[in-house]
Amino acid sequence: MAGLIIFVIVGVIAVVAALGMLLSNNAVHSALYLILNFVCVAIFYLLLNAPFLAMVQITVYAGAIMVLFLFVIMLLGAEQVPLSSSLRWQMPLGVVMALALLGTAAYAIISGGVTLAPQELASEAEAFGSPFQIGDVLFQNYLFPFELTSVLLLVAMIGAIVLTKDEQPKKETD
């Protein structure tokens, strides 16, 4: 019962943080709302008995990636997001997509969704989110995409260094 109460409270906080992120005109405030949303996701992982995934969520997403986002936002001076008239089509599209998501969720709830046998559910719950299970799936089923992602990140890092390199002509000394 306590888990359900925590889930509802954290769920409401996550939805409010997501709405704050979307509706904020200040990019720094949006990033801070996103950090709060990542913390809520980490709490959901804890409720699912996956402490490793919760700590990875906090460390990688709420920590490292959001620090990078905030750094880029402040470096570019893009704190205030101007309301552009060229992107007015996004609001109706967003409403349509939200209604489609709600319709899909309602259909899944009404139809009963996917059910597992109790023994399958218990065996999956025991191993869910363990470092061994994550490593096993990552390096057996997704080794090539994992390595491809690492090469892509390396190329992006080299590209960022090349783009920010200060081009100063060498002075000739006579």
Image: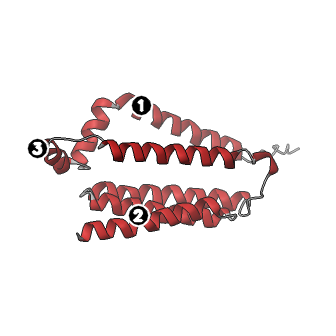
Query: In this figure, which residue is indicated by the disc labeled 3?
Result: 119
Question: What residue is disc 2 on?
Answer: 11
Q: Describe residue 124's horizontal placement relative to residue 171 as left or right.
A: left
Q: What element carries label 1?
A: helix
Of labels 3 and 1, earlier in sequence is: 3
Q: CA separation, marks 3 and 1?
A: 32 Å
Residue 145 tag number: 1
Q: Quadrant of the N terminus?
A: bottom left
Q: What element carries label 2?
A: helix
Residue shown at the point (30%, 30%) measured from the top left: 141
The residue nearer to you, when weighing 155 against 32, is 32
User: Would you call the spot at circle 2 few (<14 residues within 10 Å), some (14-19), or many (20 or more)?
Assistant: some
Residue 93: mark in rendering: none
List x then y, in percent, for residue 52: 28, 56
Q: Which amino acid type is marked by label 2?
A: Gly
Residue visible at 70% across and 42% down in the picture: 163
Relative to 62, is 71 on the left or the right? right
Q: Which residue is drawn at 46% across and 37% down?
A: 150
Residue 129 image point, x, y percent: 26, 50
Q: Which of 8 and 146 is in front in this view?
A: 8
Q: Residue at 28%, 66% (x, y): give it.
A: 4
Name which quarter of the figure residue 54 lies in.
bottom left
Between 21 and 78, the one lying in front of the other is: 21
Identified by mark 1, the residue type is Pro
Residue placed most toward the observer, 80 or 162: 80
Q: Would residue 137 appear left or right of 21 to someone viewing this image?
A: left
Q: In which quarter of the image is the C terminus?
A: top right
Amino acid at circle 3 = Gln
Q: Give the vertical position of 107 relative to 33 (above or below).
A: above
Front disc: 1 or 2: 2
